[in-house]
Image (tube, rainbow, N blue to C red):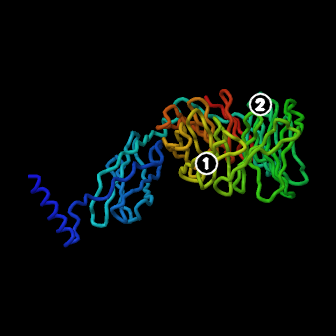
């Protein structure tokens, strides 16, 4: 029998050589498990993606099974390794599994891929544990453009373009009032781009319209009515632009335009020194978060990059994640990275191994997600014109929207303290009661 089989294989090989017919071809490889938004509301459209990695054929067509009896059309034929995407919405709540199938030009078909679980909720039941309500606001001067926010005790600090740093007393959430203000070199039209608070000190990233200076300044805000400059790190070179920062102990990590992450030592605030810097992806950067000796940088349309800063004098880019849209916000809680991106996406990654982040889920919103903050089991998302959303992330693979409230401006960033969220809403501070 073994001889007969051997001769059979030889004959088949001879026939293949003569006719050019592949008797053993079973179709293209199985597509990768689809990825995309995993938590939606009824009738909310989302886009799903997959690719086929197959060396046996040059091009493939792909279709999706959306788990509700609906199938997409076959895509145009694309090169192997190219990403294919299709959109779908569901008209009933439930958990659906999105799968993908590939075929080659001879209509040989793969089996279906592993399914992506998508949770679809009834939008009328999304606020079961939250009752978000705007209870107070503070309006800024025209063109102040508040986009970054921090909190110290009963005071909220807001970084604004043109208006400087505002310090707002929020001890009465229904009636916030200005307590103090700091405007660096007002004649040069300063942009205060970001603010972080550590103890009695506020760190701000400043650029100017009418002079080349880029600065990280540290202010003593122990007396909120009279913030006082303690020290500043200054750079006047053309290829530096300080916009967003994060503070760990005496080290300030700052990014902006022109590709670089700078690490500055403020142990002596009156004489800060540059410790190290590294080139990172994209021209513009919109946020930074540092945790466990890794810096996570929002790199616009390059996604988010992870930088190893164990040795601050020699930072090294370690990995990149690429959620849908341009990444504007990053936040790390435990071993999870949360990114906020345009197109209204909150994407969650497992970064237990920062060199190899793994996407766990993605949740869609109605506008551009500009910022994200995580506290306990909830993520708070600033969704531009759509305001503030609260998301239950206790199961990071199936995040669920728990509530939302529109704000009058453009929501950019949030801080949460107790039962209140404070939103930098571009032209105002909005105070939201959560429950």
Left or right: where 201 falls relative to 32? right
- Asked whether residue 175 is in view, the answer is no
Which one is earlier in the sequence, the residue at label 2 or at label 1?
2
Nearest to the eye among marks 2 and 1: give it: 1
Q: Nearer the viewer, residue 9 or 287?
A: 9
Answer above or below: position of 406 versus 200.
below
The furthest residue to the bottom: 18
- The residue where tag 2 is placed is 152
Along the viewing direction, whichever of 240 and 405 lies nearer the viewer: 240
Q: Position of residue 189 (x, y in %)?
A: 86, 54
The residue located at (53%, 39%) in the rendering is 353
Image quadrant containing the C terminus: top right
Secondary element at tag 2: strand
Q: Position of residue 432 (x, y in %)?
A: 67, 34
Residue at horizontal 34 percent and vertical 64 percent from the top = 57
Which residue was labeled with disc 1? 305
Q: Position of residue 159 (x, y in %)?
A: 78, 44
- Point out residue 223 in the picture as x, y percentages from the top left corner: 87, 30
Residue at the (58%, 51%) spot, across then down:
303
178 on left or right of 37: right
The numbered dot on residue 139 is: none
Residue density around tag 1, few if under 14, some if 14–19, many if 20 or more, within 10 Å? many
In the image, residue 374 above or below residue 82:
above
Alpha carbon distance from label 2 to label 1: 29 Å
């Amino acid at each position: 029998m073994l001889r007969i089989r051997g001769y059979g294989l030889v004959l088949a090989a001879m026939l293949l050589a003569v006719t050019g017919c592949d008797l053993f071809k079973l179709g293209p490889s199985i597509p990768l498990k689809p990825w995309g938004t995993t938590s939606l509301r009824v009738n909310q459209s989302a886009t799903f993606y997959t690719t086929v990695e197959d060396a046996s054929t040059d091009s493939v067509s792909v279709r999706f099974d959306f788990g509700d009896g609906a199938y997409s059309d076959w895509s145009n034929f694309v090169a192997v390794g190219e990403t294919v995407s299709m959109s779908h919405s569901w008209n009933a709540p439930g958990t659906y599994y999105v799968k993908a199938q590939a075929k080659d030009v001879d209509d040989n078909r793969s089996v279906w891929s592993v399914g992506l679980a998508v949770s679809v909720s009834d939008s009328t039941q999304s606020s079961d544990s939250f009752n978000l309500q705007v209870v107070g606001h503070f309006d800024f001067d025209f063109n102040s453009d508040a986009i970054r926010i921090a909190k110290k005790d009963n005071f909220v600090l807001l970084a604004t373009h043109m208006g400087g740093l505002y310090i707002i007393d929020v001890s009465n959430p229904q009636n916030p009032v200005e307590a103090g203000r700091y405007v660096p070199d007002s004649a040069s039209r300063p942009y205060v781009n970001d603010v972080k608070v550590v103890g009695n000190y506020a760190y701000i990233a400043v650029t100017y319209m009418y002079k080349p200076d880029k600065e990280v300044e540290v202010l003593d805000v122990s007396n909120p009515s009279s913030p006082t400059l303690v020290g500043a790190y200054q750079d006047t070179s053309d290829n530096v632009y300080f916009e967003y920062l994060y503070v760990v102990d005496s080290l300030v990590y700052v990014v902006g335009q022109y590709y670089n992450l700078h690490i500055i030592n403020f142990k002596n605030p009156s004489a800060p020194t540059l410790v190290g810097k590294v080139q990172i992806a994209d021209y513009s950067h919109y946020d930074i978060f540092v945790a466990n000796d890794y810096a996570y940088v929002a790199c616009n349309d390059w996604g988010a990059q992870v930088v190893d800063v164990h040795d601050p004098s020699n930072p090294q880019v370690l990995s990149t994640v690429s959620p849908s849209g341009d990444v504007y916000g990053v936040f790390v809680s435990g071993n999870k990275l949360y990114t906020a991106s345009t197109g209204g996406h909150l994407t969650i990654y497992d970064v237990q191994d920062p060199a190899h982040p793994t996407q766990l889920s993605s949740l869609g919103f109605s506008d551009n997600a500009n910022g994200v903050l995580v506290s306990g089991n909830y993520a708070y998302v600033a969704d531009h014109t759509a305001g503030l959303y609260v998301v239950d992330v206790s199961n990071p693979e199936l995040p669920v929207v728990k509530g939302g409230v529109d704000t009058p401006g453009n929501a950019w960033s949030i801080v949460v303290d107790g039962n209140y969220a404070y939103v930098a809403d571009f032209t105002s501070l909005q105070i939201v009661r959560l429950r």
